[in-house]
Amino acid sequence: MLSLYPTYQVLATAFFAILLTGLLTPIWIRFQRSKNVGQVIRTDGPTEHLQKEGTPTMGGLLIIFAVIVIYFLMVGREGYTSKSILALGMVLATGVIGFIDDIRKVGNERSLGLSARYKLTWLLGVALFFGYFFITSDISTAVKIPLTQIELELNWLYLPFIFLIIAGTTNSVNLTDGLDGLAAGTATIVMMAFAGIAFRQGNLGLAIFAAAVAGSCIGFLWFNSYPANIFMGDTGSFALGGAIAAMAILTKTELFLLIIGGIYVLESLSVMLQVFFFRYFNKRIFKMAPIHHHFEMSGWSETTIMVRFWIISGLLSGAGFALYFAKPV
């Protein structure tokens, strides 16, 4: 019945994803507490975070599970497309990398899991694997320049370009996941923007996928907001980064991602600038990077940072959405 009304189908997808994640998360929290499984906190981070040691983690598993279940429950015959299946595959692949990282952290009782080199190697494999299907399907290898009618044809260079998008987005979302509710909230906003773009493009399957991700994040956020009862772990941040990257590639909004996901660009730039200035000038321009820790060290509460970053993310996502549909110059 809902398939006759695609708008309600997308909204219902988000609602059921919220419900399923909201029901499963308390069970997962109780299970981890019964097994004494919890997050290991970095000692070089803000000292206030040390009290979060032992908080249940790997909530990203619930987000991934809810996305898959709700997608297949709600997509219907009309929305079942190769693009949406590729997006699901991307979430699974990047989520597995994050899960391995989380398992190593929990198993070794250390805050360090996979090295950056191993993560990038695995992400390169994911990019090459999915890039092959992207290029051999009906997805164009041209990249649209915002606010113009110019499309830059990359041909085989589209493969390394895909790698940059996937690696950049997954790691940026991972950097953002440093405060309670920050990554889940911003991912919700970004995926809602992409759901709107996919829906306007007539790609119902991708819109439903994006709505399932957004809804799952909202359901998880109920327990992840400050003070968090559970963390998503690298399982969640990598899976969400993969979902956002997949939506940018599959909706052909690769460069618009810089605006829609601008909050992640801000977080990544703060780290790169901090490293650059310290290495070459022996100075720190932020009290701590990523930038949300700078504001935390400046006396802002986690809740204040979280809400203000949500607002910034909403403004940037809205601007990116509007620019995509703006008339080219």
Image (cartoon, rainbow, N blue to C red):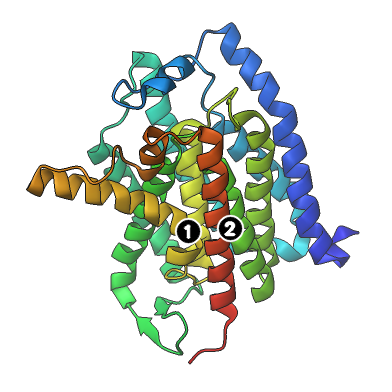
Question: Would you name the residue on which mark 2 appears?
Answer: 314
Q: Along the horizontal axis of the image, is 83 left or right of 93?
A: right
Q: Is 288 left, or right, of 329 in this rendering?
A: left
User: Which badge, 2 or 1, comes first in the chain's sequence?
Assistant: 1
What element does badge 2 sit on?
A: helix
Residue 28 position, x and y percent, is 63, 21
Q: Residue at x 31, y 20 (%)?
A: 43
- In the image, what residue type sits under mark 1? Gly
Q: Residue at the location (9% across, 48% down)?
A: 281
Which residue appears at 49% of the width and 71% of the height? 253
Residue 202 visible: no
With 138 as the anchor, is 34 left or right in this view? right
User: As displayed, is residue 9 above or below residue 221?
Assistant: below
Q: Badge 1: how crowded within 10 Å, few (<14), some, or many (20+)?
A: many
Q: Is residue 75 above or below residue 304?
A: below
- Give the image quarter of residue 78: bottom right
- Badge 2: few (under 14), some or many (20 or more) residues near its Cα, within 10 Å? many
Q: Amino acid at mark 2?
A: Gly
Image label count: 2
Q: Find residue 250 and report its horizontal and vertical position in percent.
A: 52, 66
Which residue is situated farthest in the right direction here?
A: 1
Asked if labels 1 and 2 touch by Cβ distance under 8 angstroms, the answer is: no
Q: Is residue 107 visible?
A: yes
The residue closer to the viewer here, 189 or 117, is 189
- Give the residue furthest to the front: 299
Numbered label attached to residue 261? 1
Single out the mark in the foreground, 2 or 1. 2
